[in-house]
Image (tube, helix red, strand yellow):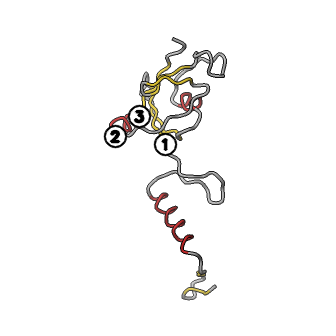
Amino acid sequence: PETLAGKGFTMMIVSPRFHILVLAWIVASAAGFVVGAPGRRGTALLAQTPLTNAATGTKKLFNEGSPLKSAVAGIGVKVNFNCKKGDCGTCTVSVGGKQIRTCVGKVPPAPKLKSVLEKGLPVKYVGGR
């Protein structure tokens, strides 16, 4: 390694692929994407979905694909559970008009429409109707 202008910086020759990966990480960080700590496995960029409690208007962002059970609790929607396997339908919630069983469901992808993205997907408890 060489010392750069006597300032204590070192310069190493690395592959062009490394530079591209570092540049992509810097751009993603500046754009506000969630980036995991370096060296950890499974720390890809995660898309976030806005969910809104239809009754109270509480809105929060959740990682796409995370358990819906914790996301729904995070925005204050009270859900009853019975079988906890997705069979009975007691825990059914409406997320953006689509009915999902909370105990086995995942947070859906973010909506593509800007107006819905700003408001968040409305979530309300419908139970086993």
Marks 1 and 2, Cα distance to the nearest angstrom? 14 Å
Q: Position of residue 60 (x, y in %)?
A: 48, 36
Which residue is at 49% across, 16% downward?
126
Indicate which disc, 2 or 3, sits on the residue closer to the N terminus: 2
> Does dot 1 land on a helix, a strand or a loop?
strand
Q: Amino acid at mark 1?
A: Gln
Q: Quadrant of residue 1?
A: bottom right
Q: Residues within 10 Å of mark 2 (few under 14, many from 20)?
A: few
Q: CA distance from mark 2 to mark 3?
A: 10 Å
Disc 1/disc 3 C-alpha distance (Å): 11 Å
Considering depth in this image, is 38 or 129 the residue closer to the camera?
Answer: 129
Per the image, label 3 sits on a secondary structure element best described as loop
Which label's residue is closer to the chain start, 1 or 3?
A: 1
Q: Position of residue 43 (x, y in %)?
A: 60, 52
Front residue of 14/29: it is 14
Q: Is 52 on the left or on the right of 127, as rendered?
A: left
Please tell me the numbered disc located at residue 114.
2
Answer few, some or many: residues within 10 Å of disc 3's Cα (few below 14, many 20 plus, some between 14 and 19): many
Image: 67 above or below 86: below
> What is the residue that sits farthest to the left in this orientation?
115
Q: Amino acid at mark 2?
A: Lys
In the rendered image of this protein, does residue 121 appear above or below residue 31? above
The residue beneath circle 1 is 48
Question: Which residue type does callout 3 highlight?
Answer: Gly
